[in-house]
Amino acid sequence: MAASVEVAGIEHAYGSVPVIRGLSFALAAGRIGCLLGPSGCGKTTVLRCLAGFEPVRAGTVAFSGRRVSAPGALVAPEARGVGMVVQDYALFPHLDVERNVGFGLSRRSAAERDARVRDMLALVGLAHAARAYPHELSGGQQQRVALARALAPAPELLLLDEPFSNLDVALRERLSVEVRAILKESGTTAILVTHDQREAFALADEIGIMRDGAIEQWASAYDVYHRPRTRFVADFIGQGVFVRGVVDGGARVLTELGELDAPLAPDARDGDALDVLLRPDDIIHDDASPWRARVESKTFRGADFLYTLALASGTRVLAVVPSHHDHALGESIGIRPQIEHVVAFPASALDDAG
């Protein structure tokens, strides 16, 4: 049965260097979570603490209410009901696919083991490759074998550590979608560690944005993109720029692109300076608009262009524009804001964020 995961205030350090600082999150059984953040933020160390490879100095880790980690108390990795998929697949080169998948099933009868292997290979779409060896498979197929091997013992929790980092971008995106479908079909609770936002968005139900050993926000992909709680999350997720605004009339912010309705802090006062987040999809190309911007650069992406545009003040914004609108560098075009979720932070946060 899939496990719920509860992580409460865990801390960890290597020697005198703190790596995890009071980190907490909860994940319901059957859900897929993701720890997303830049290199060095501590996300892999969290995964190792969940697996039981590292102790915690403070806090607790519990699976389905069973405490598996606490200061001075550590349930061994093999007793946790945890499976793991790592970035280099760790397949046995001398074993064929069938025996790789069945490697962790030695305590079952031969009939049970064979049936489970067949089920797992069917689940990952590799029934036809049972007799192949790892070197005869593509990178994507090897990753699916590693996933089947990890799922074969029916772990309560599956941990995935940068599982697609060795694959090219197109395959990485496709496999993210495929792996999510496999995990959902098997009902497995899983936690992914990655620095790739596209993987996180494609695979996870909930995402924890990590910074310096702590989680800044734990929410759905939609919310961390459209409703970031901190300046760091807003900067890290997606593309966007900040434009200066001023509180005007309580719940409105006056910007170079007009007035915007915004959820403001209770203590916000008229005249307070804010930085307003603008995503590329917040800026609409509109020749009839009174606001003009100069095309500074553009990136052709097939169905659309990503334009970098300079406003009259020199402030730069990004805009996604359908590719049949092919404007020249230096050209002035009409734009207007169309923002469903206005996100703003105190202007002083710009300096604090670094």
Image (cartoon, helix red, strand yellow):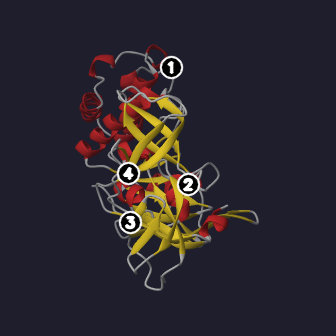
In the displayed structure image, the side of residue 145 where residue 50 appears, left or right = right
- Residue assigned mark 3: 260
- Residue assigned mark 1: 94
Please state the horizontal and vertical placement of residue 94, each as a whole percent of the image.
Answer: 50, 19
Could you tell me which secondary element the residue under label 2 belongs to?
helix
Would you call the spot at circle 3 few (<14 residues within 10 Å), some (14-19), or many (20 or more)? many
- Quadrant containing the C terminus in the rendered view: bottom right
Q: Are marks 1 and 4 in contact (CB under 8 Å)?
A: no
Q: Is residue 63 visible?
A: yes
- Residue assigned mark 4: 336
Would you call the spot at circle 4 few (<14 residues within 10 Å), some (14-19), or many (20 or more)? some
Q: CA distance from mark 3 to mark 2?
A: 37 Å
Give the residue type that dot 2 points to: Lys
Work out whether mark 1 precedes mark 3 in sequence or the reverse, and give the earlier one.
1
Q: CA distance from mark 1 to mark 3?
A: 63 Å
Give the residue drawn at x 34%, y 62%.
Answer: 4
Please state the horizontal and vertical placement of residue 162, each as a whole percent of the image.
Answer: 51, 41
- Residue assigned mark 2: 43
Residue reaching furthest to the bottom = 267
Instruction: Point out the frontmost of discs 1 and 2.
Output: 2
Give the residue type that dot 1 points to: His
Give the residue drawn at x 31%, y 39%.
Answer: 108
Q: Quadrant of residue 112?
A: top left
Work out whether mark 4 precedes mark 2 in sequence or the reverse, and give the earlier one.
2
Q: Is residue 52 visible?
A: no
Q: CA distance from mark 1 to mark 4?
A: 61 Å
Which residue is nearer to you in this view: 120 or 181? 181
Could you tell me which secondary element the residue under label 3 belongs to?
strand
Could you tell me which secondary element the residue under label 1 belongs to?
loop
Give the residue type that dot 4 points to: Arg
Q: Are marks 1 and 3 in contact (CB under 8 Å)?
A: no
Work out whether mark 3 precedes mark 2 in sequence or the reverse, and give the earlier one.
2
